[in-house]
């Protein structure tokens, strides 16, 4: 830590400690520490342009502590079990124990920031779990999950802190629920085995269900059951699709695996093309996954559980639900729906983007405008904000997707702050109706200021975090190839939503805080130090992200780019294939060639021993495709293998190569493969055709362990 | 008797001799009524049988362990055991079922040790009835001949009929026993009739012979003389399947289940839901795979698969929707066990195209179902005490606050039944889905998963009452009982549910190896 950092932190401490009026010493020190920690964090993370050494060795992940993520998952889970054995009467013990576990998790998660997140997976930890089905414990983080983990470890203590202030009953269960939730949420963000992901995805429902049902409002039971059943319905569909995918992989390669990395290579058939393309396996599986995630997001029309759950949940539950849990919908769509079914995702993107804008951004905004319950209004505003995130993902441009990931964090912070703020007045008046307030800025000035800051962040005023995310999403949408000719309209619709957000948020601010003060509210006390302490980190983060978004964007960019380019390469190779009338439709599932993926992507993927020589043709595909344009080596191969690879490569080849598929000669095969590369990665076509000799020696020896990719000519950059 | 034969038969022998010995012990330990005291209420039974409960549980656990031991030794290393075939086949299939059923029976015996004295129906007969019924169940699992199959079926059923009516003072219990007995005898008659027709058409009572004969018949079915015999075989098969469907309580043969399950004392209910159901599935698999495993009977156009698939859909859907409307938790669990029979039938249907995988999924599911169901009934027993038995949802209101451990255990078992990871029930369901998707039964597996969403509703309702509601003012409170036996059973089941849920590898492998060829 440099001298300037210490100096800055000390300055922030002084500001935090001396600026507030009429606070006790303890509170001053607390506020000062929060300020100093925030500054130290920013200063410590500032990317140092002179430090090329860290960036150079960043590709090497061997120095990372491999139990990093495992400890992040299991420290809270074990803590939650330990809480059950603490004495019920010791409220303070339990609370401090929970704080301790959460604080430890937060510190451990901060340690991850030391790693510059380069492309591919970091902190990979794998372990065989159920060998019979190829299920492994496989966790890893990249630049996308990094921020979501930090969001989780950052928000959970705040939510717990706020809850302990207002909830005095059944504290033991509350501590259990918070800790268990934290562990399972982190687990779901880092799981790369679909089985493991599913386990965490489902297991987190139980504590949230208890949280809504035990400490919720008047309609808590209905809301809790609705929440559980909605999510479970979606995840059951997803489970069926997961198992189908596993079976398909087993049919092609003879190996069971639930690993996301291995399953990414499975290309499900897209063949029956009637009835809106809905009846082919790829589309069905895409929808099975996506419906599960759309429910979680939630997107119109499966969003109806959200207002109920939010309104009924206690403040802490609402914060966690909005800030972290909804992100599983967007994160899951990004990682799994787009990663496993790129073609179907690209195919449906314009339509679902339309739903995200009309049903999410515009319609939810209009509904929010009409709400007279502040919490319900914020719940609907969540639906609208998550519409932006989904739009950024549907557009699938680098800018849009980065904006989407940033917006996931932003929404967590600003909506979390808003829910905390609503909880503050609810604790005082036990009503959330707009009409019960009015003019309270006169009696609660500090509260009003904080509320306005959170509102501005939510609306997206420049200088706050919301502006950066939404701006990037709209920018990305405008240039989105996937959205076709309507990308411009999509962008305009999204921009219109920003105006609507201002309308509903500012109108509620006006009605609640300004105007005439109701005499009943004359004795409202301003926000307490405890509540300020809970809100302070969030408010600080609003400005940190608003002014210095590059801290966040620079860490996530390589990962987002990798995901985006792979998505584009696979989706476009399919599209080109579809566009040509001469190639037959894909009716059989197959493995995508390894060259579609970056080598970094397969770090930690399962490997299998070499199969028998008479492996099925599909297995040969992988091998043949891993040697693109390997003219010299291919010529030396037996004729049978040459013909197998000819068939295999033409199945993915562009129209121009369809005519040569009849030829079995190895030399032709090579040229076919070369043109396949060219078509799948337009930007790299010149390079691929100009330097066939250069890429030839890079071909792998005859049998690499299953998904060990060759360097991807088109996998790197794509506009 | 040679050593090999003794070793092969040891799981049955342990249970038989243990049961007989315990019966003698029970008679000797019975205290004579003190002279000169006024005659007590004849409907109040206050025996001292709870030690017998422990003995029974140990005997049955010993049976399970011995079955495991024979499994380790390998039944293929005991060639002399083949001399009993086809009347009693000792293969991995039989051993797996012996293990599951003995474990289920042991849990039921432990529950009874706490339940019977608490509710003053403490008579020593309960344990021999249970033990010998279990012997019938093991015989049933090993029977590859219609004669011994019927023998096992009746031995098992007779004991269970008595257990159902064990609460003499309760009209409900008696009614349930009579209902169960009448319908059960009727179903047994149907089974026998089906077997008789099969014997008439094929000349065999052993399943292997029937299979061979049916195969020959199917190849000659164009011959007009053979046509009538084919018809008889089909009628016999349908009758046999109907009889078995009654035992596994598949819709529409399930009418007795809720009444019998509700009327019987809860440990007996647990035994019926667990061991008896497992035995019935063993019988179903033996008959369908062993007897009708030829390509013609296994075809979707002319064989049993569409029947089983139809039964599965009906069973899952009807049972789940009816269970959601129950007001009694015990009755809800009864319907839920019917629904689980439906899920298991999906696994049976998927044996058509992937035999080992389909059977393995059924066997593994039975294992997980045994732990979760026995545990759920155990937790229900634990939540009530004399005169204050937990029956309806309202009885459970607020248990989560007053008795957190009992409520937590109950929640665990219900979540396992609902199929929430990381419990055993989830993995069982996953494996059935995997097997049925592998067999191409996409619609069936999606229906199964959607059904489990419906099921989640009523399982969660229990959690709602336990954790989120307070008992109405003045309502009678269910007071949890204090019993080491019941607690032990619940802890045992909970440990099993978590262990199989987190590390299903080895038990899954066993289930797959146990499949019939």
Image: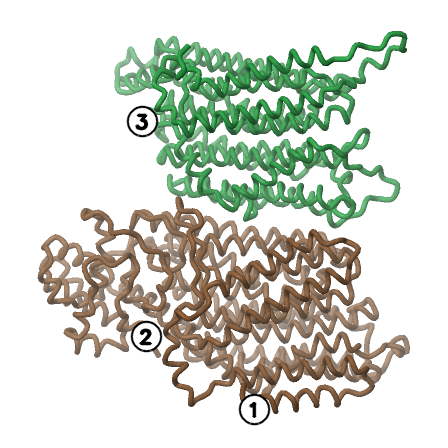
Q: What separation in Å lies between label 2 and label 3 (alpha carbons)?
A: 53 Å
Q: Chain B shown in which color? A: green
In this rendering, the answer to whether A57 lies above or below B56 is: below
For disc 3, the neighbor class at 10 Å (few under 14, some 14 to 19, many from 20) is some
Q: Please name whichever residue, A92 or A178, is drawn nearer the observer in this view of the structure.
A: A92
Pointer 3: what residue?
A: B295
Task: Give yes or no for contact between labels 1 and 3 (Cβ–Cβ under 8 Å).
Answer: no
Percent of width and height locating residue B26: 68, 14
The residue wearing badge 2 is A716
Q: What's the distance in space between the residues labelled 1 and 3, CA to CA? A: 82 Å
Specify the label residue A3 is tagged with. 1
Look at the numbered disc 3 and give the secondary structure of its residue: loop
| Quarter of the view holding residue A602 | bottom left
Give SS at disc 1.
Answer: helix
- Return the disc, 2 or 1, that comes first in the chain's sequence: 1
Q: Position of residue B347 (x, y in %)?
A: 45, 35
Q: Position of residue A719 (x, y in %)?
A: 35, 79
Q: Which chain is brown?
A: A
Rendered image quadrant of residue B59: top right
Frontmost residue, A15 versus A485: A15
């Amino acid at each position: 830590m440099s001298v300037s950092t210490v100096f800055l932190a000390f300055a922030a401490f002084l500001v935090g400690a001396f600026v507030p009026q009429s606070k006790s010493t303890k509170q001053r020190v607390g506020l000062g520490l929060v300020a100093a920690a925030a500054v130290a964090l920013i200063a410590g993370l500032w990317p140092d342009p002179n430090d090329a050494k860290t960036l150079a060795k960043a590709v090497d992940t061997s120095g990372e502590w491999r139990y990093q993520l495992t400890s992040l998952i299991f420290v809270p889970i074990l803590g939650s079990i330990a809480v059950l054995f603490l004495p019920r009467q010791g409220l303070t013990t339990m609370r401090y124990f929970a704080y301790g576990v959460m604080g430890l998790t937060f510190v451990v998660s901060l340690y991850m920031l030391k790693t510059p997140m380069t492309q591919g997976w970091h902190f990979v930890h794998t372990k065989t779990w159920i060998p019979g089905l190829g299920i492994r414990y496989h966790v890893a983080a990249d630049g996308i999950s990094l921020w979501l983990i930090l969001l989780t470890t950052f928000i959970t203590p705040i939510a717990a802190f706020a809850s302990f202030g207002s909830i005095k009953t059944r504290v033991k269960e509350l501590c259990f629920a918070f800790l268990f939730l934290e562990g399972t949420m982190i687990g779901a963000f880092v799981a790369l085995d679909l089985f493991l992901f599913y386990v965490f995805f489902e297991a987190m429902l139980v504590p949230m269900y208890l949280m809504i049902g035990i400490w919720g409002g008047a309609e808590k039971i209905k809301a809790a059951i609705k929440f559980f059943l909605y999510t479970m319905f979606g995840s059951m569909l997803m489970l069926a699709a997961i198992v189908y995918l596993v079976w398909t992989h087993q049919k092609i390669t003879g190996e069971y695996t639930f690993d996301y990395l291995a399953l990414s290579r499975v290309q499900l058939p897209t063949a029956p093309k009637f009835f809106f393309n809905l009846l082919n396996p790829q589309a069905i599986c895409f929808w099975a996954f996506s419906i599960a995630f759309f429910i979680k997001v939630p997107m119109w029309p499966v969003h109806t559980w959200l207002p109920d759950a939010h309104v009924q949940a206690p403040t802490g539950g609402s914060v966690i639900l909005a800030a972290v849990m909804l992100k599983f919908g967007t994160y899951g769509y990004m990682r799994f729906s787009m990663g496993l079914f790129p073609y179907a995702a690209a195919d449906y993107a314009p339509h679902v983007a339309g739903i995200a804008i009309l049903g999410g951004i515009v319609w939810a905004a209009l509904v929010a405008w009409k709400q007279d319950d502040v919490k319900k209004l914020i719940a609907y505003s969540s639906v609208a904000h998550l519409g932006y995130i989904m739009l950024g993902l549907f557009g699938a441009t680098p800018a849009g997707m980065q904006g989407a990931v940033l917006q996931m964090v932003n929404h967590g912070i600003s909506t979390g702050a808003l829910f905390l703020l609503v909880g503050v007045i609810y604790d005082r008046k036990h009503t959330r109706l707009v009409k019960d307030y009015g003019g309270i800025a006169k009696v609660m000035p500090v509260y009003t200021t904080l509320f306005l800051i959170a509102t501005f962040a939510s609306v997206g005023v420049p200088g706050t975090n919301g502006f950066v995310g939404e701006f990037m999403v709209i920018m990305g949408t405008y240039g989105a190839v996937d959205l076709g000719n309507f990308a411009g309209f999509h962008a305009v619709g999204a921009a219109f939503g920003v105006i609507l957000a201002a309308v509903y948020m500012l109108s509620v601010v006006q009605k609640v805080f300004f105007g005439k003060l109701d005499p009943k509210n004359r004795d409202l006390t301003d926000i307490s130090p405890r509540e300020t302490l809970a809100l302070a980190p969030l408010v600080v983060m609003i400005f940190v992200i608003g002014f210095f978004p590059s801290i966040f964007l620079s860490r996530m960019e390589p990962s987002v780019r990798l995901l985006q380019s792979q998505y584009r390469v696979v989706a476009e190779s399919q599209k080109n294939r579809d566009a040509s009338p001469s190639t037959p439709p894909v009716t059989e599932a197959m493995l995508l060639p390894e060259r579609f993926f970056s080598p970094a992507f397969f770090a930690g993927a399962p490997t299998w021993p070499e199969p028998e020589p008479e492996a099925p043709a599909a297995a040969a595909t992988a091998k043949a495709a891993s040697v693109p344009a390997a003219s010299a080596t291919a010529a030396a191969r037996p004729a049978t293998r040459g013909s197998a690879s000819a068939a295999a490569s033409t199945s993915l080849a562009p129209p121009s190569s369809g005519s040569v598929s009849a030829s079995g000669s190895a030399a032709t095969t090579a040229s076919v493969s070369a043109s396949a590369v060219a078509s799948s990665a337009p930007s790299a076509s010149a390079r691929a055709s100009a330097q066939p000799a250069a890429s030839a020696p890079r071909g792998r020896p005859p049998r690499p362990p299953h998904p060990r990719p060759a360097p991807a000519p088109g996998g790197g950059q794509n506009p | 008797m040679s050593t090999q034969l003794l070793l092969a038969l040891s799981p049955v022998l342990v249970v038989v001799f243990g049961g007989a010995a315990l019966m003698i012990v029970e008679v000797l330990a019975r205290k004579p009524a003190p002279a000169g005291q006024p005659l007590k209420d004849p409907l109040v039974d206050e025996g001292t049988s709870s030690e017998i409960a422990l003995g029974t549980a140990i005997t049955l656990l010993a049976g399970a362990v011995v079955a495991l031991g024979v499994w380790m030794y390998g039944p293929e290393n005991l060639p002399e055991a083949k001399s009993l075939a086809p009347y009693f086949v000792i293969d991995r299939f039989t051993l797996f079922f012996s293990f599951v059923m003995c474990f289920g029976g042991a849990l039921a015996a432990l529950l009874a040790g706490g339940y019977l004295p608490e509710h003053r129906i403490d008579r020593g007969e309960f344990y021999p009835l249970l033990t010998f019924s279990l012997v019938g169940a093991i015989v049933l699992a090993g029977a590859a001949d219609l004669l011994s199959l019927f023998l096992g079926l009746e031995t098992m059923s007779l004991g269970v009929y008595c257990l159902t009516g064990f609460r003499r003072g309760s009209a409900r219990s008696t009614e349930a026993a009579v209902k169960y007995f009448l319908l059960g005898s009727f179903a047994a008659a149907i089974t026998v009739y089906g077997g008789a027709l099969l014997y008439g058409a094929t000349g065999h009572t052993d399943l292997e012979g029937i299979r061979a004969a049916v195969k020959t018949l199917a190849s000659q079915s164009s011959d007009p003389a053979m046509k009538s015999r084919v018809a008889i075989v089909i009628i016999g098969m349908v009758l046999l399947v109907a009889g078995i469907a009654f035992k596994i309580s598949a819709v529409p043969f399930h009418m007795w289940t809720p009444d019998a399950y509700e009327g019987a004392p809860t440990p007996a209910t647990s035994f019926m839901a667990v061991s008896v159901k497992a035995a019935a599935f063993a019988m179903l698999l033996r008959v369908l795979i062993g007897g009708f495993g030829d390509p013609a009977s296994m075809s979707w156009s002319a064989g049993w698969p569409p029947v089983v698939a139809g039964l599965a859909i009906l069973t899952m859907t009807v049972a789940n929707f009816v269970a959601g409307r129950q007001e009694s938790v015990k009755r809800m669990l009864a319907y839920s066990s019917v629904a689980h029979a439906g899920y298991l039938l999906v696994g049976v249907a998927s044996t058509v195209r992937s035999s080992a995988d389909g059977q393995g999924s059924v066997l593994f599911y039975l294992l997980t179902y045994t732990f979760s169901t026995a545990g759920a009934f155990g937790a229900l027993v634990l939540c009530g005490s004399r005169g204050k038995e937990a029956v309806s949802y309202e009885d459970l209101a607020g248990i989560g606050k007053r008795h957190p451990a009992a409520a937590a255990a109950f929640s665990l078992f219900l979540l396992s039944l609902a199929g929430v990871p990381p419990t055993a029930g989830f993995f069982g369901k996953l494996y059935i889905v995997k097997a049925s998707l592998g067999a191409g039964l996409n619609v069936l597996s999606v229906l199964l998963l959607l059904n489990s969403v419906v099921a989640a509703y009523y399982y969660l309702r229990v959690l709602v009452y336990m954790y989120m509601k307070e008992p109405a003012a003045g309502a009678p409170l269910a007071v949890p009982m204090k019993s080491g036996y019941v607690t032990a059973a619940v802890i045992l089941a909970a440990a099993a549910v978590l262990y199989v849920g987190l590390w299903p590898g080895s038990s899954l492998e066993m289930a797959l190896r146990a499949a019939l060829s």
